[in-house]
Amino acid sequence: MSATVPLLEVKDVRQSYHKDSSADLLVLDDVDLTLQSGEIVGLLGRSGSGKSTLLRIVSGLLIPTAGDVRWRGKPVVGPAGGVAMVFQSFALFPWLTVEENVELGLEALGVPRAERQNRTEAAIDLIGLGGYESAYPKELSGGMRQRVGLARALVVHPDLLLMDEPFSALDVLTAETLRTDLIDLWSDGKLPVKSILMVTHNIEEAVLMCDRILVFSSNPGRVAHELAVPFPHPRNRQDAAFRELVDDIYSVMTRRTAKPATHTLTSTTESSFATALHPISTNLLAGLLEALTASPYEGRADLPALAQSLQLEADELLPMGEALQSLRFADLEEGDLQITTHGREFVQADTDNRKLLFASSLRANVPLVAVIRRTLDERRNHRASAVRFREELEDHMSPDYAEDTLRTAIAWGRYAELYSYDEEVAEFSLEDIEHEG
Ligand code: ADP
Ligand code: MG
């Protein structure tokens, strides 16, 4: 029987977060997923689509609001044995050495001391940390720290390795080295795991590493598409077939849906206020609009091509495109980025007029910025603490997303000269800003 039972089955899973001041936020709905021994599966989706939430459910850290999660045919009711997780940020204990950090996972399992030491040593060697056993995390580069995170997950010989954007905090080269090392170990049968489920928002990374890719839709998150990646390892990013698959996935991910891709809430009155913003600098946005307008694109570009010509990682471009779309400066459709009339106006304007155009787009399209400015206009002293905006955002999204969203509103509003922001006291004001009254 065991040969036919999948490692993992997720059926009709739904997750909503209960928020005090509004209706529940539905994050996952009707999620189905089956994982077999021997495969690497990628969960690919935009930020905020619920990928991390699903991983936490799979690991047993979070019990879903509804639905069924089975591990080797048995319901998961708490942290599952046989599953280990690697996080985006390294989550190492700073006061423990590399060796101690890695061994930690085994102590919890009650493995005898001698075996713990053997397995720790083996995991450290396997993942390329030999010689760093007694180093402390602060002495290591980001790449080495993430290797410690991997070794700590592998040392328990989990049947299923879960990875939540494990390479996204690393620089491009380090990330690529780590990906290739991991795939080499996997292909050589040296990883003590049966299956890997990895979350990413990086399309190329998914195509590079996975046997199967599940494309997540947002609002609520569900598996919208499934694609097989039929290429043997090692894979070459430049192969025509590789590029074609990347292109197809871009199309799937930018396909127009009934409503724009925002964090939708069940209560419509406040929904727009709670749209998460991608922390992207106005410089980058302007540069992207300029490149898009110029030759050879002349206003419409294939996303992967545009990413390459701007020397951007493919995964960096999609959120930028989404930001431009939310500002109505460009549209995303079928894998292309298409400039709008507003976008063209912006590109043609001089510095001062760009600020004005950005300001009017913000006020029309980014309710958070509009609310901040309105609050400042209405107050006698034209000041407002950031705390209340952060708290309001946290009613609708996780603290991380709230922080990113607030930082973005600060940066964009400052550029547009809609308000000033004093970091020291965390306060918005209209100091040095032109305004009535
Ligand atoms: P992803 O990993 O795809 O970026 P997440 O699973 O982290 O997405 O989050 C999905 C949505 O759920 C986001 O809108 C996020 O703000 C919200 N969310 C996540 N965790 C919480 C939480 N503990 N409380 C409230 N909202 C949350
Ligand atoms: Mg996440």
Image (spheres, rainbow, N blue to C red):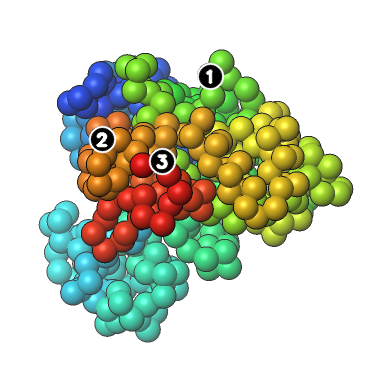
- Give the residue drawn at x 25%, y 41%: 380
The quadrant of the rendering that contains the N terminus is top left
Specify the amino acid type for callout 3: Glu
**Position of residue 249 measured from the top left corner of the image (x, y, whole percent):** 65, 35
Which one is in front in this view, the residue at disc 2 or the one at disc 1?
2
For this rendering, which residue is in front, 221 or 99? 221
| Position above or below: 46 against 179 | above
Label 2's element?
A: helix
The residue singled out by tag 2 in the image is: 392
Specify the amino acid type for callout 2: Glu
- Give the residue drawn at x 56%, y 52%: 282
Label 3 beta carbon within 8 A of ligand 1: no
Mark toward the start of the polypeptide (2 vs 1): 1
Horizontal placement of 403 versus 114: left or right? Answer: right
**Position of residue 436 measured from the top left corner of the image (x, y, whole percent):** 41, 41
**Disc sitting over residue 259 in the figure:** 1
The residue singled out by tag 3 in the image is: 436
